[in-house]
């Protein structure tokens, strides 16, 4: 990037920033649509329990409710990174 | 066939009541027998915008409770033939509106009217949910502003799941976006979300764009629905929106800033 380019690259307008933020939050909220209200609290509790044994981050756990034919499936996903002790012990 | 239209938004103060009055009046002016119902129980305001506040005797809740007949509660508009208003109650009892009570009233209105316009309260509480529950079509009123757009998206989610049409698995409520208080000058400066931005995020068909206009306050001061002010930009924009609502193909106006001449810059100009 040349010296002049530095001055040419305009900062995004506030409307552009608003649009980006909206797209992210709306996508996030849509993915949680129709999920029962207790899921976030359940996820928090599960996180606390798992952390007693393995140190994990908030984004390594996800809880969701899916509707199958005539039953509902509560799905819990915990991803362990290669540097978490449990994953290390298994390999 | 009667159509039930809900005017909704989630966020408060974005122009639902202004829109309900304008669209309801517009439909009646086109010859359709129309009633506008104020669902904002406890915060009645449609009566002021329609200039019938001193003629309210009975209200929506009186009819639900059987304290008056529907005929007694309906107020006939003084300006427009075919136009009626059903005022909200000023009661603070949140449970005054019941699904069965509302259904009975709507069923009775359906035998008389072509269009039933439901002016929803703000929020996503009971009042707003009941206002949209029986809707065939929804006008989602949105301002080009971050929290209004987000709330509109939530409302769209609720329209998809919590309406009678959704529950019965019938064809979904037909949703339309009405972007109000739009200021093209600020959009061009990058200070305000553009109509394209909002359309892209909400992804529903655009019914119209109503510009930010001093004429709106002037109209509400006098209790004259803005659509009667055919001189004003906002009045014309609502007129266009009503025509689109009825299926006409009308080009969008007032989307770009008016170039101000020397004199209007000096003296403020019209509007
Ligand atoms: N296009 C416009 N230009 C300028 N002012 C407007 C416009 N539309 C609405 N307003 C103003 O915004 C304010 C709120 O409008 P209105 O009462 O219609 O909103 P609302 O969504 O019904 O509010 P609530 O959520 O409280 O019911 C009013 O003062 C009105 O005059
Ligand atoms: Mg209102």
Image (tube, coloured by chain):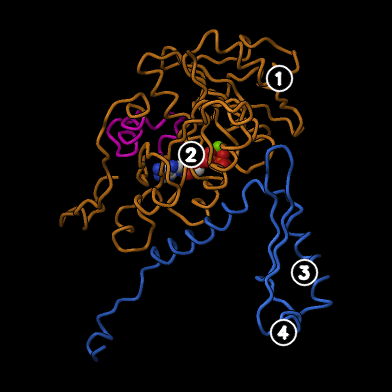
Chain colours: A blue, B orange
Residues indicated by labels 2 and 4 sit on the same polypeptide chain: no
The numbered dot on residue B101 is 1
Q: For the view shown, which residue lies furthest in the left direction?
A: B262
User: Do the residues at discs 1 and 3 belong to one chain?
Assistant: no
Q: Check if mark 3's residue and mark 2's residue have beta carbons within 8 Å.
A: no
Chain to which mark 4 belongs: A
Q: Is residue B45 above or below residue A72?
A: above
Mark 1 sits near ligand 2, with its Cβ under 8 Å away: no
Q: What whole-number distance in Å separates the C-alpha atoms at marks 4 and 1?
A: 63 Å
Which residue is the site of mark 4?
A88
Residue under numbered circle 2: B140
The magenta region covers: B216-241
- Magenta region includes residue A13: no
Residue at the image position 53 percent from the left and 45 percent from the top: B13
Q: Nearer the viewer, mark 1 or mark 3?
A: 3
Residue A3 or B166: which is nearer the viewer?
B166
User: Considering the numbered disc 1 on the image, is that residue within a helix, a strand or a loop?
Assistant: helix
Measured Cα–Cα span from mark 2 to mark 4 = 53 Å
| Eye-nearest disc, 2 or 4 | 4
Closer to the chain start, of discs 2 and 1, is 1
């Amino acid at each position: 990037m040349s010296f002049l380019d530095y001055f040419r690259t305009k900062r995004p307008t506030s409307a552009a920033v608003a649009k980006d933020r909206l797209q992210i939050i709306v996508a996030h909220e849509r993915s949680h649509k129709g999920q029962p209200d207790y899921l976030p609290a359940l996820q928090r509790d599960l996180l606390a329990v798992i952390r007693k044994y393995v140190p994990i981050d908030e984004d390594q756990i996800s809880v969701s409710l899916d509707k199958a034919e005539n039953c509902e499936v509560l799905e819990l996903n915990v991803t362990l990174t290669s540097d978490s002790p449990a994953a290390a012990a298994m390999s | 066939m009667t159509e039930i239209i809900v005017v909704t938004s989630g966020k408060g103060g974005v122009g639902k009541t202004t829109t309900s009055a304008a669209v309801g009046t517009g439909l009646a002016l086109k010859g359709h027998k129309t009633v506008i119902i104020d669902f904002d129980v406890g915060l009645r305001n449609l009566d002021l915008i329609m200039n019938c506040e001193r003629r309210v005797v009975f209200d929506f809740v009186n009819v639900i409770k059987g304290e008056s007949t529907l005929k007694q509660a309906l107020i006939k508009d003084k300006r427009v033939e075919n136009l009626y208003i059903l005022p909200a109650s000023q009661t603070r009892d949140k449970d005054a509106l019941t699904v069965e009570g509302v259904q009975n009233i709507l069923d009775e209105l359906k035998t008389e009217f072509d269009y039933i316009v439901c002016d929803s309260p703000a929020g996503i509480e009971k009042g707003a949910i009941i206002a949209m529950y029986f809707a065939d079509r929804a006008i989602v009123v949105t301002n080009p502003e971050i929290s209004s757009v987000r709330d509109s998206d939530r409302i769209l989610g609720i329209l998809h799941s919590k309406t009678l049409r959704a529950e019965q698995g019938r064809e979904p409520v037909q949703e339309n976006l009405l972007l109000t208080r739009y200021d093209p000058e600020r959009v061009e400066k990058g200070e305000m979300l553009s109509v394209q931005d909002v359309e892209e995020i909400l992804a529903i068909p655009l019914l119209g764009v109503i510009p930010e206009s001093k004429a709106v306050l002037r109209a509400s001061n006098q209790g004259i629905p803005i659509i009667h002010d055919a001189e004003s930009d906002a009045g014309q924009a609502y007129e266009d929106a009503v025509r689109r609502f009825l299926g006409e193909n009308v080009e969008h106006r007032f989307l770009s800033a008016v170039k101000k001449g020397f004199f209007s810059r000096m003296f403020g100009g019209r509007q």
